[in-house]
Amino acid sequence: MSSLLPAPEGATCASHPEALANWTCGRCGSFMCPACERRVRPEALPMCVACWELRSRTVAQQQDSDSGITLLNVGLGLGLVSLFPFCVAIQLASFVVNIVALVRARTPPARALRWRAWLGLGLTGLGLLVTLVMMWH
C-alpha cells in the first residue's frame, strides 16, 4: 500500500477549483479538498470521488458474482441431500434455491456455472421420485 499523499502547497481541488486541496488521490493522482475525500475507514488512504465511484461499482459487481456462485453451490448441495428418501422439506428447499439460483445467475462468472442449478434440480426431482415410489410401496 502506498503512503499518505498530501497535496502540494497551493494545489486546488479537481472538483472545486476555489478550494485548497489537502490530499492527492493514491489511485489517479488528482487533488481533492476535505469535502471530496472518500475513505473506506478513517485510517485508509483518501480517494477522489471518481475513484470512489469506480471502486463502489467494482465491489458491488464482485459481491453480486460471489453471492450468485454461493447460491449455485448451496443448490447443488441441497440437490445431493435430496436424494435421501423422505427428506421432503429439504427437497422443497432445494427446488426453491435452485430456481432462484438459475434466475440470479445471469451474469459472468455465475452464468457459466448454471449447470450446477440444473443438476441440483435434476437430483431434487430424482429424490422426490424415489420418495414417492417408496411411499406407494
Image: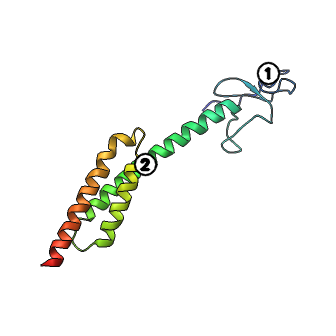
In the image, residue 39 sits, relative to residue 118, either above or below, namely: above
Residue shown at the point (39%, 39%) measured from the top left: 109
Task: Give the residue at x 30% y 55%.
Answer: 76
- CB within 8 Å, label 2 to label 1: no
Q: Residue at x 33, y 46 (%)?
A: 114
Please rate how many residues cluster around mark 2, counting C-alpha atoms within 10 Å: few if below 14, some from 14 to 19, many from 20: some
How dense is the environment of label 1, judged by Cα within 10 Å: few (below 14), some, or many (20 and up)?
Answer: few
Seen at 55% across and 36% down, the residue is 58
The part of the image, by quadrant, that contains residue 57 is top right
Where residue 82 appears, as percent x and y from the top left, is 26, 65
Residue 18 numbered mark, or none? none
Q: Amino acid at mark 2?
A: Arg
- Look at the image and name its color scheme: rainbow
Quick one: SS at disc 1?
Answer: loop
Q: Which residue is mark 2?
A: 104
Front one among 137 and 33: 137
Label 2 secondary element: helix
In the displayed orientation, state which residue is furthest to the front. Answer: 136
Which quadrant of the rendered structure holds the C terminus? bottom left
Q: Position of residue 90 (x, y in %)?
A: 32, 68
Placement of 107 over or under 86, stated as above or below: above
Q: Position of residue 31 (x, y in %)?
A: 75, 25
Can you identify the residue that label 1 sits on? 8
- In this picture, residue 137 sits left or right of residue 84: left
Residue type (three-letter) at the residue carrying disc 1: Pro
